[in-house]
Amino acid sequence: MAGFSPGKQWNALDLRDGEKKATNYSGKYSTHVFTERVQQVIEQHDLSKPMFLYLAFQAVHSPLQVPKRYMDPYNKTIKHKTRKTFAGMVSCMDEGIGNITQTLHDTGMWNNTVIVFSTDNGGPINVGANNWPLRGEKHSVWEGGVRGVGFVSGPVLSDDVRGTVNKEMIHVSDWFPTLVTGVAGMDLTGTKLDGFNVWDAIARKDTLSPRKEILHDIDPFYGRTIFTNESGIPCTDYNTSMHAAIRYGDWKLITGDPGFDRGCGWKPAPDSGINPPSIPVKPLNDTIWLFNITADPNEYNDLSKKHPEVVEELVSKLKAYQKTAVPVVWPAGDLKANPKLGDGAWGPWA
């Protein structure tokens, strides 16, 4: 915890039901707990009122744990224990989503429901995830770290888009205006937002997304350990040694340390028998990569030397973004955060 000496930590219950600590779920698998609670919320909902429900399962995420019965179906097909546990966790989550969907049908809500299912980032390879054939993993700006998959489902979607693959550019910040304006039909005029309403790009076949670029990251302190800074570290001007990535149209620029292996960042699933490609490792002082990410989503071919004009254009965009950055602050640790000073569970403090 920032501001404390190494090894200083508190252990406490980290589960609440509203504002009350939830103490009656000991020994229960969280995917089951969350699923059952969501079913209860749906069953008790007043159908005369709209409902927005956000469900963030703890699956699939480390620590990798799942009841044995969800792993057993993979005993003959997956020998790697970590991957088998991961697969079992996915199956359990899939079961939960199926149960929630059935509850929507049983209550008569399904016919007026839109379901959005999305990942938040690429998976960490060392704990069972796999992003093959994409390069990289979580915490990196390779596509294996930043390209998310998901789906949108529900009877409000027309037959000509159901079951189709949509590769339009969508960012997590787009979900708010998309759901509020595109789905619910509410007016956000005058609200300053970074996101776009991309509902038409989702619900209407062959409709382009209004989004043309994505700032994946600019982090001048990437890889550094900074424990405390109360006043904030002023953001310096951008330069190409900084950890950063931006997508603009078909182009993606990476600078600085991209994270997860500068050379061979492609990791096939264990026991797959696939040999990853071998790409020459860039010298440490060469900190610029450029890809046509539409034609080369696996990031095999660095085009930075071939298209310096594109590099210059995207670097100028990163410079402009960095000028809007606010100082970076790492608050000191606060002993008043100790759960023992409250009700014994993690929660807000003053």
Image (cartoon, grey):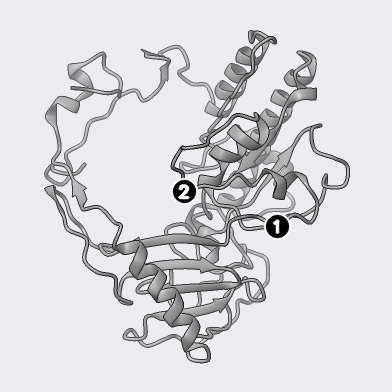
Mark yes or no: residue 259 visible. no
The image shows residue 307, relative to residue 26, as above or below, that is below
* Outermost front residue: 190
Q: Which residue is mark 2?
A: 194
Residue lying at 59% horizontally and 32% vertically, measured from the top left: 180
Q: Is residue 17 visible?
A: yes
Where is residue 237 drawn, in percent x and y?
Answer: 24, 69
Left or right relative to 102: residue 272: left
Outermost residue toward the bottom? 306
Q: Nearer the viewer, residue 289 or 67?
A: 289
Please state which of residues 8 and 101 is positioned toward the viewer in this rendering.
101
- Packing grade of label 1 (10 A; few <14, some 14-19, many >=20) is some
Q: Does 236 appear above or below 156? A: below
Quadrant position of residue 103: top right
Residue type for callout 2: Asp
Left or right: 266 in relation to 190: right
Pointer 2: residues within 10 angstroms few (<14), some, or many (20+)?
A: few
Q: Nearer the viewer, residue 139 or 230?
A: 230
Q: Position of residue 344 (x, y in %)?
A: 26, 17
Q: Quadrant of the C terminus?
A: top left
Image position, residue 7 (x, y; %)? 18, 43
What residue do we see at 15% from left, 38% from top? 333
Earlier sequence position, callout 2 versus callout 1: 2
Looking at the rendered structure, which numbered label has been put on residue 208? 1
Q: Is residue 123 left or right of residue 88?
A: left
Judge left or right: residue 85 versus residue 329: right
Local SS, label 2: loop
- Seen at 52% across and 67% down, the residue is 247
The correct choice, above or below, for 84 with respect to 220 in the image is: above
Q: CA–CA distance between discs 2 and 1?
A: 18 Å
Residue 82 is tagged as none
- Check disc 1 and give the amino acid type: Leu
